[in-house]
Image (cartoon, rainbow, N blue to C red):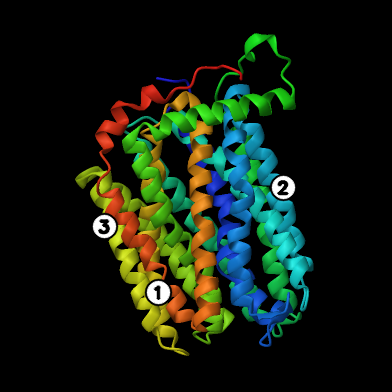
Amino acid sequence: MAEHQNDPGSIRAWITYDWANSAYATTILAAVLPAYFAAEVVGDGGVDIIGRNWTGQDLWALAVGAGPLIMFLATPVLGAIADFSGSKRLFLVVFATWGAIFTSLLFFAATGDVLLTLGLFLLAHLGFVGANVFYDAFLPDLTNDDTIDMVSSRGFAWGYLGGGLHLLLSLALIQLSDGPIPIDTALATRIAIGSAGLWWLGFGMAAFKNLPRVGIAQELPGGVTPTWRAYTRFGFSRTFATLKKVVHNRPLLVFIIAFMLFNDGVQTTIALAAIYATETLDLGITIVIVGVLLVQFIAFFGAMGFGRLADRVGTKPALLASIAVWSAVTLAAFFLPAGEAGPFLALAAVIGFVLGGTQALSRSLYGSMIPEDQSAEFYGFYSVFSKFSAIWGPWMFAFVRQVTGSARLAILSIAVFFIAGGILFKSVDIDDGRRNRGALRTPATMT
């Protein structure tokens, strides 16, 4: 067994980072910033850009899709370089610090600052996406086939609690403003947004202290000096070689395509739920935050529950069940009545239950089909396909809403991703994929 596999201290440190960055996932990506952007930064009248009037809902959907498009080209190369240089931890620290700083700067986004808000959000999102490549890449180094599902589920579960706790504190600050706390609500909201970056950075640094340096640095072939240029050249070379092998490994290839589809649905639903509730369902920011809090805290039990379900019935049946529930969620969202908090909160509870299972089991299933000594490279691919898929759902939402004028039809269109992804995933031979993962190893050659 590798030195750090199943080491409790290393696993706790890894889980702590999920607790840290989940403040961004909840407050910035899912709840407070989207609602604040729609209601305060853009406002009811929308904003005119390139000859068209854009609502906050449309602009947010486009922005959520733009960040992953940029990272699409960078993450597999960064993963390959991190594997070869033995520097997963360094890359994680750099990207996490970058993301946390720009998240904190979102405090300065005020009413009417549309471009500033979108620019800071995109820069913060690049840090979040990039850091997750290297965070995920630790999973095969810290676990084995017997523990990977449960450890992955624990990471998501404690992340939901951490993000939920920060969001709860944000809700308290916003609710008590203009009252016991003598600041206006807009300022309280900006403090909540900016503090997500401080939370991410503070708990992240605590995690990095005990997170092991996994992997062994190797000499570049041919005596090449290990410069950034040489690492980049090697990264591209090995990335294309790995891509070629993945294409010829059917189980892994089919899983990746299926994951792209159903994950697109998951990411779109989470990213647009708050702004859909604000603009289409006419719900206030307090109800939106309560809904996301429900998702976060129920997701803790959902992640742990699906981890145990996977142990009992297998990862594939458990993941298929979660995808089926997601399909029903999009249909229910279409029929949600405007102005009524109860149905929205009930649907948020259902989302919370399946969210943890879908994310945790997808990550661990993929990790069980790749070689652990090249995990950063392959999790680079995983993140690329995860984020590449996350482009199309938000953009489809924006397109359908612009064409039809109906956000309800736009949210219903997301069901296509769940249905297609579920059908394709059902055909994946997981056991065959695990048996063949040794064939995915890429020799260290330069081209």
Q: Residue at x 73, y 15 (%)?
A: 225
Residue that mark 1 sits on: 412
Q: Quadrant of the C terminus?
A: top right
CA neighbours of label 2 inside 10 A, class few (<14), some (14 to 19), many (20+): many
Placement of 336 over or under 440, stated as above or below: below
The kind of residue on which mark 3 rests is Ala
Q: Residue at x 51, y 35 (%)?
A: 137
Residue that mark 2 sits on: 98
The quarter of the picture where residue 148 lies is top left
The quarter of the picture where residue 125 lies is bottom right
Circle 2/circle 3 CB separation < 8 Å: no
Secondary structure beneath label 1: helix
The kind of residue on which mark 1 rests is Leu
Circle 1/circle 2 CB separation < 8 Å: no
Say left or right for 311 vs 143.
Answer: left
CA neighbours of label 1 inside 10 A, class few (<14), some (14 to 19), many (20+): some
